[in-house]
Image (cartoon, grey):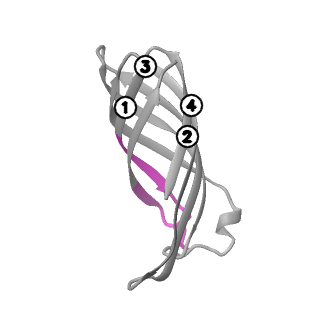
Amino acid sequence: MGYSLGYAYFIKPNLTASIGFGYLSNGTRKDEEFGDSYFRLMNIPFTFTYLLGQSKHKMELYTGLRFDKLETSVLDLKPDAWNRWYMVPTAGIGYRFMGKHFFGSLTAGIVRYHYLNENNDVEWLFIPGLKFGYRI
């Protein structure tokens, strides 16, 4: 189960600054490959989004930082992983429909993780996204 909440402020008509909060957890389940597996992630993203296009249909480019807490049995993390915050860069591209009050976005982003294994190898994760919002 996961959820997120965010706020975006239009600095200019085509540039936003955003902050959010997200939480994702799958609880504990029996899995043949991983045994008793669990996963939970909490993040606070700070992003800037640039909107390209003059109509209601826009392409969005975003970049920023995420502060993540991650705990999982699937990856080889240290036991204290949930007690640590990790700062990770994020970037992506997407399509946004901008109505008068409602908007929606379909995005494809990447996040660079360097703490996912004991060797601190860099891992790039693909993060799809679907957003809906209301403009005041």
Q: CA gap, disc 4 to disc 3? A: 15 Å
The local crowd at label 3, few if under 14, some if 14 to 19, many if 20 or more residues have their Cα within 10 Å, is few
Q: Estimate how packed mark 4 is, as few (under 14), some (14 to 19) or many (20 or more) residues with alpha carbons within 10 Å.
A: few
Q: Is residue 26 above or below residue 124?
A: below
Q: What amino acid is at disc 3? A: His
Q: Who comes first in sequence, dot 4 or dot 1?
A: 4
**Residue picked out by circle 1:** 104
Which residue is located at x 53 percent, y 76 percent? 73
Which segment is the magenta one? Answer: 107-125
> Which residue is label 4 attached to?
7
Instruction: Quote the CA–CA distance across marks 2 and 4.
Output: 7 Å
N-term mark: 1 or 2: 2
What x and y, as percent, mark residue 71? 59, 67
Direction from residue 33 to residue 135 in the image, left or right: right
**Mark closest to the chain's N terminus, 3 or 2:** 2
Image point (50%, 24%), residue name = 16
Q: Residue at x 37, y 31 (%)?
A: 104
Marks 2 and 4 in Cβ contact (< 8 Å): yes
Secondary structure under tag 4 reads strand
Q: Secondary structure at mark 1?
A: strand
In three-dimensional space, the C-alpha distance between marks 3 and 2, rounded to whole angstroms, equals: 18 Å
Amino acid marked by disc 4: Tyr
Which residue carries the number 2 mark? 5
Residue labelled with disc 3: 101
Give the residue at x 66% y 75%: 79
The three-letter amino acid code for the residue at tag 2 is Leu
